[in-house]
Image (tube, rainbow, N blue to C red):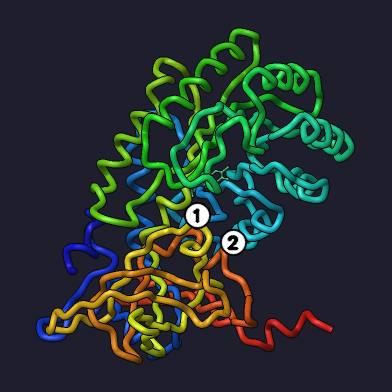
Amino acid sequence: MTAAINHHGLRPPAFEYRGRLDKELYCEKIRLASLAGRYGTPLYVYSTQMIRQRLQAFAHSFKDLRHTVCYSVKANSTLGILRLVAAEGSGFDIVSGGELQRILRIDRHAAERAVFSGVGKTETEIELALCSKIMLFNVESESELHLLAATAKRLKKRAAISIRVNPDVSAKTHPYISTGLRQHKFGVPVSEAKTLYAQAAKERFLRVAGVSVHIGSQITDLKSFAEAMERVAELVRMLLHQGHEIQFVDAGGGLGIAYEGVQTAFAKQIGAYARAITKPFQGMKVHLLLEPGRSIVGPAGALVTRALYRKTNRKKRFLIVDAAMNDLIRPSLYGAYHQIVPARLSSSGKKETTDVVGPVCETGDFFARNRKLPVVNENDLLAIMDAGAYGSVLGSNYNTRGKPPEILVDGAEYKLIRRRETVEDQLRIEK
Ligand SMILES: *Cc1c(COP(=O)(O)O)cnc(C)c1O
């Protein structure tokens, strides 16, 4: 179990068992059980060290090329996480006005290192982005280009733009998080992009600045990235030839993590990713933008939950825990796998096969099905691993459940970066 959980190849490991007799799970130097005792469960716990190291590994792997890491805010947008990411020198990839307001909250100038993606930017969001002087608009349709041009003209603010192209490349990932095929709503076909660049170049308040692509999320097949980037490189060459100044190539995010099984060391994985992404641009003077989300924060977070009840319906065993699909929806939404481990390893080593489910009134409210786990007793604590990305951000108040608190651990210290949401918090905005 120790080996299984400490499989990220990072030192110091974020989550590991310590102790000689009773092995207890720690996040860095903090015992998860002590956090659960203080803040209650369910509870999100994140490792500062792991987030830092992953950002640094990104920077290191791309050091030979001009680049900016624009952390994808939607993966985990808690202010404490954004502050940590900004302190490492990262910019941001945002997909809404709300996310823009979050980054402005942590730093008035953060927008100057922000790229704005998304198929449905509203006029209000565009105005806010123009006034905040964001670095780049990733435009996803002709209509959006027209609205952006008109709004920029009206406000007399110049906007740097890139067209997000849809390269028609399969990302070989879950269909809900695959974005780069022609049948997906994202981006514009390469052929149409050429026309949009010509239109944009005629607008006084628009500056053609780059080409963008993002083919999906949780992608482990590097060939998909390579293929998309080859198509982008081809387009960039053509645009340069036509006299457009293509300063940025935005490669998007999407690098997958190993939720299941053994993960290769991150430095090695990211090295291979960097080679796949950059190869088509050899000899070209471009500034690469990278938008990783999941690969930065995913393995750095765990959802700590307490077992409420054991129950057996005929022969089917259930472990009912106090976290639910409203806290972490990935298993229900994508059938996603998350490793689940006890916060204290019993010496007996006995195992049993069980479903791990939450209290919400939906059969889809599960974290694991027919999972072989060490025997868990009522009141025991469990950690649902790799919950740092698309965990808390996808949370809801279904069943009038409050969102869990979030703790950011840094060595032997930790801070509460978001307190538990109360029913009062929820009712405040209702009449
Ligand atoms: C979601 C998203 C990302 C981040 O994807 P990850 O899989 O979390 O790395 C990057 N860019 C865009 C445009 C996105 O929509």
Element type where label 2 sits in the image? helix
Relative image position of residue 167 (x, y in whole percent): 56, 26
Q: Earlier in the sequence, mark 2 or mark 1?
A: 1
Kind of residue at badge 2: Ile
Q: CA distance from mark 2 to mark 1?
A: 9 Å
| Quadrant placement of the N terminus | bottom left
Element type where label 1 sits in the image? helix
In depth, the one of 33 and 63 nearer the eye is 33
Relative image position of residue 311 (x, y in whole percent): 38, 88
Picture residue at 26% right of the left edge, 51% below the top: 263
Q: Quadrant of residue 100?
A: bottom right
Residue furthest to the left in view is 20
Q: Quadrant of residue 356?
A: bottom left
Picture residue at 79% right of the left edge, 47% below the top: 122
Which residue is identified by label 1?
86
Picture residue at 44% right of the left edge, 77% below the top: 357
Kind of residue at badge 1: Ala
Which residue is identified by label 2?
106
In depth, the one of 132 and 101 nearer the eye is 101
Relative image position of residue 188 (x, y in whole percent): 66, 28
| Quadrant placement of the C terminus | bottom right
Determine whether label 2 and label 1 are within 8 Å by CB: yes
In depth, the one of 95 and 224 nearer the eye is 224
Q: Is residue 261 left or right of residue 72?
A: left
Q: Is residue 3 left or right of residue 403?
A: left
